[in-house]
Image: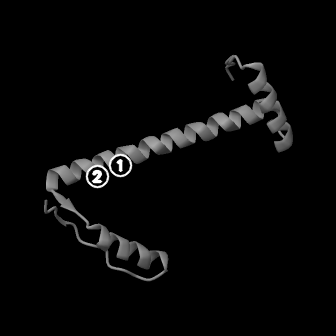
């Protein structure tokens, strides 16, 4: 496994060491977990933004949207465990 060197300010290094000890991990394992969690979050954010961009482009292309009142009713029913018909997209009326 290749090695990467990072420079960490003393105060941060002490905080990492203390947190790692409380978590029952080495500082190395703690840092790797933190990097992995941060990377997962960034990748998930990027995927979310990609989906949002695609959906926005679809709205601009078709002009169709689901009205919030219809979406809210649908989501509340689903959250309550009831079956609900998905609301239909309609042309946006300015």
List the single residue furthest toward the front. 94
Label 2: how many Cα within 10 Å (few below 14, some 14–19, many 20+): few
The picture places residue 75, in percent across and down from the top left corner, at: 40, 72
SS category of the residue bearing label 2:
helix
The picture places residue 88, in percent across and down from the top left corner, at: 23, 71
Q: Which residue is drawn at 69% across and 23% down?
A: 1
Q: Which mark is residue 51?
A: 1
Q: Which residue is drawn at 84% across and 34% down?
A: 18
Task: Locate residue 25 relative to residue 6 in the image: left or right.
Answer: right
Label 2 vs label 1: CA separation? 6 Å
Q: Relative to residue 9, is residue 36 depicted above or below?
A: below
Task: Locate residue 75 relative to residue 66 in the image: left or right.
Answer: right
The residue pinned by badge 2 equals 55
Contact between marks 2 and 1 (CB within 8 A): the answer is yes
Task: Locate residue 68 relative to residue 20 in the image: left or right.
Answer: left
The picture places residue 30, in percent across and down from the top left corner, at: 75, 35
SS category of the residue bearing label 1:
helix
Label 1: how many Cα within 10 Å (few below 14, some 14–19, many 20+): few
Q: Which residue is drawn at 36% across and 44% down?
A: 50
The picture places residue 84, in percent across and down from the top left corner, at: 36, 80
């Amino acid at each position: 496994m290749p090695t990467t060197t990072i420079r960490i300010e003393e105060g941060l290094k002490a905080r990492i060491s203390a947190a790692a000890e409380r978590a029952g991990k080495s500082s190395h394992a703690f840092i790797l977990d933190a990097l992995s969690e941060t990377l997962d979050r960034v990748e998930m954010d990027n995927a979310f933004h990609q989906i949002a961009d695609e959906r926005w482009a679809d709205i601009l292309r078709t002009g169709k949207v689901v009205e919030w009142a219809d979406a809210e009713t649908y989501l509340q029913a689903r959250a309550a465990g009831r079956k609900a018909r998905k609301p239909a997209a309609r042309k946006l009326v300015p």
